[in-house]
């Protein structure tokens, strides 16, 4: 179904001259696309990271040490190695001096043909001076004067993998560029003119064949053009998904306000201004004829659950059902235990729906949801399996789920075609990345914390004082306090770090006895939940854990957070972990243990943590320090990876792409105009499959 104009991009790399079965495996490793065979487009989107500037044309005597030089020389004598392993040397000269060209594991016959005695050659490479004599080891290029035009004045440098050389990649790239077609322009002409952007083809060719180092700069027009193309494809896909969800007519909900006010008054605290403002925005969405699709972004402890609870009350008292989906069974159970008794006072029935329930209990819950006798389902993704049907689902609240992507947002529509959707996240995501991930959603932000929240006292402590920390922890446990002790985990399969968490558990158990528990990513979810529940109930006083406790556990009386090797964590992740304490009235402390010496970036991260509790400020700083790919501390964050765009540097382009995509969908929703048809090519080119399917389905 892909347009034929794009066939040159989606050919297998093996279609290009010089790429056989052995070479293609090297490209597969380099490009890491997951495709059986890498395609031309995968190679074209593998951009150079730097350049070698070969424009310097000194004479031998004036060539600086360690610099790239391009020299015109006359070839003199060849000197074969006198012992095994010694290099082969070819001596060449100009009017100012002599240069040794050095080759290891040389093929003498080849070198005699390449560097024929008495003839002039252009050589280019890194020139070094040893003992007052210049030499060039393995010149990058050797050409006859008549072929000088083939020598690149500015040569792109690419990331490479083992077995693949820059020259091999350069030849394959040249073949790929030679087959590039001219595509219809999908960008607005006035925008291109205002920004001085080249065409898509010119931009690709320009980046792979730079004429000067500035052509590869982060603000070079060709680089920005391609980044904007990629960003616009993403924003357009999100806009189409938003339109699809909004097109399924929403319901103008009406509820008895006095009943909702009673439920609101029953909360044990007053709402903040930010919570009230968010509820006003949500109420306006619910009353409108289109479906709500809103992201509620709130820092740890900002009161997202209270907003969700009132939202559920509005929808349920209007006569529909609501579902609250949590990422873990433990968190779902905690929500149920907190919400169900309160709703019961107002005649609203709740049901817990998790995978580990007995079959009879689950069947009873399914019956209640199908008949409509259950108003609110609280559970995990198990609620949205095929065998669960709702009588009249009006609202889906997705809690603490930054891994909840566009596919899942669309799938929810199938359970309740007119249901409103509220997605909540406690991970503060910078504004630019909110657009790249949740660009199809309206956004409410909770920027205040409810009164009575005690700030967490954050301190940095060198790791060589770990015995002092353990001693103070022992005293705190004797006073009845609870603590987390987090060990680093780079990946959940990392055996070395798994050893460190079990080792720390063993050492603390020696000191504190059976009051120490252990959780990590290798455990079965049910076993992990059981340990966390024992910690919450007080059977366990110290929970030694990896980052699995980052979300999904609420223990208000835990007051101590120890993070070992804090320098290994990202800022957003440290902030999330710190948010596990300070949830009650007692003073809480977070100790960031670091191994000295640490680099400037790590030192900066720990300073930000020590000085600020503002999750949004921390998220912006994290983006600046680390970039979009790691912003949530794991590559499984659900945020999109980019080939050509660098979101932390291109926030302005993201906002422009967001506005452009909205305007396109408002004026040409089926993409049938001349620009619309070209934009369809853009969606195919960047493989926004979900959007393409929606267009086909109408």
Image (spheres, rainbow, N blue to C red):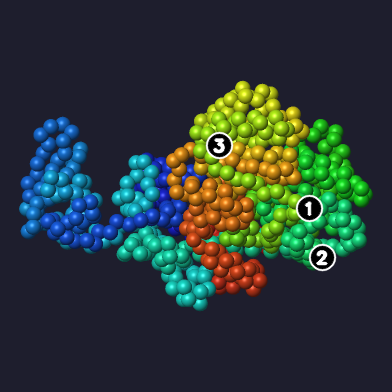
Q: Is residue 342 left or right of residue 500?
A: right
**Which mark is first along the chain, 3 or 1?**
1
Q: Nearer the viewer, residue 172 or 496?
A: 496
Q: Say which residue appears at 17% left-offset and 56% top-offset.
A: 63
Sooner in the amino-acid sequence: mark 2 or mark 3: 2
293, 566: nearer the viewer? 566
Q: CA gap, disc 1 to disc 2?
A: 20 Å
Per the model, the C-alpha gap separating discs 1 and 3 is 33 Å
Q: Nearer the viewer, residue 578 or 666?
A: 578
Is the Cβ of the residue at disc 2 closer than 8 Å to that at disc 3?
A: no
The correct choice, above or below, for 392 with respect to 581 in the image is below
Question: Disc 1 or disc 2, which is closer to the eye?
Answer: 1
Q: In the rendered view of the protein, which quadrant contains the N terminus?
A: bottom right
Is residue 432 visible to the viewer in this orientation of the structure? Answer: yes
Q: Is residue 415 above or below residue 224?
A: above
Residue, disc 1 = 306
Residue drawn at x 91%, y 61% is: 258
Does residue 676 appear in this view? no
Element class at badge 1? helix
Q: Quadrant of residue 431?
A: bottom right
Instruction: Say few, some or many: other residues with alpha carbon within 10 Å of mark 3 (under 14 / 14 to 19 / 20 or more).
Output: many
Q: In the image, is 133 to the left or to the right of 574?
A: left
**Residue at image mark 2:** 287
Q: Which SS class for mark 2? A: helix
**Which element type, helix, strand or loop, lies under badge 3?**
loop
- Expressed as whole percent of the image width and height from the top left, the position of residue 446 reads 70, 58
- Kindly indicate whether the residue at mark 3 contacts the one at mark 1 (C-beta within 8 angstroms): no
Which numbered disc, 1 or 3, marks the residue closer to the eye?
3
Give coordinates of residue 366: x percent, y percent. Answer: 84, 42
Quadrant the C terminus occupies: bottom right
| Residue labelled with disc 3 | 564
């Amino acid at each position: 179904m892909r347009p034929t104009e794009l066939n040159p991009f989606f050919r297998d790399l093996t279609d290009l001259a010089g790429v056989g079965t052995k070479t293609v495996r090297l490209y597969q490793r380099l490009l890491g696309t997951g495709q059986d065979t890498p395609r031309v487009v995968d190679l074209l989107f593998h951009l150079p990271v730097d350049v070698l500037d070969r424009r310097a044309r000194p004479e031998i005597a004036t060539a600086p040490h360690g610099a790239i030089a391009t020299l015109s020389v006359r070839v003199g004598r060849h000197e074969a190695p006198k012992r095994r392993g010694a290099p082969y040397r070819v001596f060449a000269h100009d009017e100012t001096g002599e240069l040794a060209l050095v080759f290891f594991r040389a093929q003498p016959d080849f070198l005699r043909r390449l560097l024929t005695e008495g003839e002039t050659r252009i050589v280019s490479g890194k020139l070094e001076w040893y003992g007052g004599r210049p030499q060039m080891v393995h010149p990058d290029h050797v050409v006859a004067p008549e072929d000088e035009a083939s020598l690149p004045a500015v040569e792109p440098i690419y990331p490479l993998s083992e077995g693949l050389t820059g020259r091999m990649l350069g030849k394959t790239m040249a073949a790929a560029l030679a087959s590039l077609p001219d595509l219809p322009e999908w960008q607005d002409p006035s925008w291109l003119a205002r920004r001085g952007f080249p065409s898509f083809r010119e931009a690709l060719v320009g980046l792979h064949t730079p004429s000067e180092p500035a052509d590869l700069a982060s603000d070079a027009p060709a680089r920005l053009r391609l980044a904007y193309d990629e960003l616009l494809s993403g924003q357009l896909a999100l806009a189409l998904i938003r339109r699809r969800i909004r097109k399924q007519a929403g319901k103008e909900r009406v509820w008895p306000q006095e009943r909702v006010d009673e439920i609101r008054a029953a909360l044990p605290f007053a709402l903040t201004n930010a919570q009230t403002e968010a509820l006003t925005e949500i109420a306006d969405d619910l009353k409108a004829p289109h479906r709500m699709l809103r992201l509620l972004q709130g820092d740890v402890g900002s009161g997202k659950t209270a907003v969700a609870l009132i939202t559920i009350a509005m929808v349920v008292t209007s006569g529909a059902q609501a579902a609250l989906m949590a990422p873990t069974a433990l968190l779902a159970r905690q929500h149920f235990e907190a919400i169900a008794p309160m709703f019961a006072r107002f005649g609203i029935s709740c049901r817990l729906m998790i995978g580990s329930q007995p079959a009879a209990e689950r069947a009873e819950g399914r019956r209640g949801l199908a008949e409509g006798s259950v108003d609110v389902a609280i559970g995990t993704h198990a609620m949205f399996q095929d065998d669960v049907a709702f009588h009249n689902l009006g609202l889906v609240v997705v809690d603490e789920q930054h891994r909840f992507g566009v596919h899942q947002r669309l799938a929810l529509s199938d359970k309740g075609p007119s249901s409103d959707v509220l997605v909540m996240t406690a991970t503060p995501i910078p504004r630019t990345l909110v657009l790249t991930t949740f660009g199809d959603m309206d956004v409410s932000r909770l920027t205040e914390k409810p009164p009575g929240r005690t700030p967490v006292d954050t301190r940095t402590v060198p790791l060589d004082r770990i015995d002092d920390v353990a001693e103070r922890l022992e005293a705190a446990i004797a006073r009845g306090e609870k603590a987390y002790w987090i060990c680093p985990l780079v990946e959940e399969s990392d055996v070395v770090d798994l050893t460190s968490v079990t080792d720390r558990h063993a050492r603390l158990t020696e000191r504190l006895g059976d009051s120490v528990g252990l959780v990590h990513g290798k455990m079965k979810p049910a076993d992990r939940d059981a340990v966390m529940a024992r910690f919450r109930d007080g059977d366990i006083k110290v929970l030694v854990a990896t980052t699995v406790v980052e979300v999904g556990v609420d223990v208000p009386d835990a007051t101590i957070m120890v993070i070992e090797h804090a320098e290994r964590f990202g800022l957003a992740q440290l902030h999330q972990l710190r948010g596990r304490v300070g949830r009650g009235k007692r003073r809480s402390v977070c100790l960031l243990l670091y191994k000295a010496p640490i680099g400037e970036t790590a030192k900066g991260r720990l300073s930000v943590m020590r000085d600020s509790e503002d999750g949004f400020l921390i998220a912006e700083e994290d983006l600046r320090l680390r970039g979009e790919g790691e912003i949530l501390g794991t590559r499984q964050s659900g945020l999109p990876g980019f080939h050509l765009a660098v979101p932390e540097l291109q926030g302005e382009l993201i906002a422009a792409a967001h506005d452009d995509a909205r305007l396109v969908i408002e004026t040409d929703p089926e993409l049938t105009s001349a620009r619309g048809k070209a934009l369809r090519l853009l969606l195919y080119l960047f493989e926004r499959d979900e959007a393409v399917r929606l267009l086909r389905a109408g």
